[in-house]
């Protein structure tokens, strides 16, 4: 290969690697899940269970009731600016949990009662 082709390929690989590392280190400060609490959510039993049973266990994730809204995960940075918005309607309960974990959120550890 010609030197310019090798240089171009090397530069391209560097940019792709840099983009991959940047995507992995993206940090969200908090998340909100916005949805109605019944209506369309009643037709999505996995998402409903996720919202009411799993979400309260996560740190920095809250549920916000919005009448008539489809379930969405909204991710914010430390400046409270929206960074990403994802529709949860087509996901299973496990996929919703996996999504939160993949975005860097963790569950709170249950506190044992002290005697």
Image (cartoon, rainbow, N blue to C red):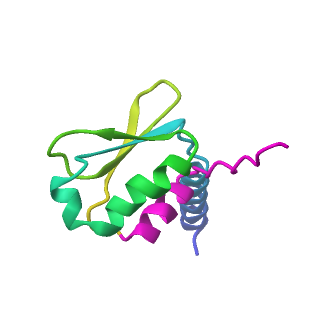
Dividing the picture into quarters, in which one does residue 41 lie? bottom left
Task: Tell me if 30 is positioned left or right of 91 in this view.
Answer: right
Q: In the displayed structure, would residue 81 be above or below residue 54? A: above
Above or below for 81 versus 53: above
**Looking at the image, which residue sits at the far front?**
115
Q: Is residue 87 magenta?
A: no
Instruction: Name which residue lies at 27% across and 52% down.
Output: 71
Q: Quadrant of the N terminus?
A: bottom right
The image quadrant that residue 29 belongs to is top right
From the viewer's perspective, tell me whether residue 80 is left or right of residue 12. Answer: left
Query: For this rendering, which residue is in front, 81 or 1?
Result: 81
Task: Return the x and y of residue 97 as percentages of the image width and height.
Answer: 49, 62
Query: Furthest-right residue in view?
Result: 115
| 74 in relation to 103, above or below | above
Q: Quadrant of the C terminus?
A: top right
Magenta highlight on residue 100: yes
- Relative placement, left or right, of 3 versus 56 is right
Q: Residue furthest top?
A: 79
Q: 6 left or right of 100?
A: right
Residue drawn at x 54%, y 39% is 60
Outermost residue toward the bottom in this view:
1
Q: Residue 93 appears at what percent x and percent y? A: 41, 68
Q: Which residues are magenta?
A: 92-115
Q: Which residue is found at the position 25% from the left and 48% from the top?
A: 37
Q: Position of residue 84 (x, y in %)?
A: 38, 44
Which residue is drawn at the image coordinates 58% and 62% (left, top)?
A: 13
**Which is nearer the eye, 55 or 26?**
55
Q: Percent position (x, y) of residue 47?
A: 34, 62
């Amino acid at each position: 290969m010609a030197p310019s082709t090798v240089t171009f390929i090397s530069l391209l690989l560097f940019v792709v690697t840099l983009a991959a590392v940047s995507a992995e280190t993206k940090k969200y400060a908090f998340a909100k899940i916005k949805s109605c609490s019944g209506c369309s959510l009643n037709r999505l039993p996995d998402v409903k269970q996720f919202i009411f049973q799993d979400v309260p266990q996560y740190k920095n994730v809250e549920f916000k009731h919005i009448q008539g809204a489809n379930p969405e995960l909204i991710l914010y940075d430390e400046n409270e600016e929206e960074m990403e918005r994802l529709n949860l309607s087509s996901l299973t309960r496990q996929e919703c949990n996996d999504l939160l974990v993949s975005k860097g959120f963790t569950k709170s550890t249950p506190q044992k009662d002290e005697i």
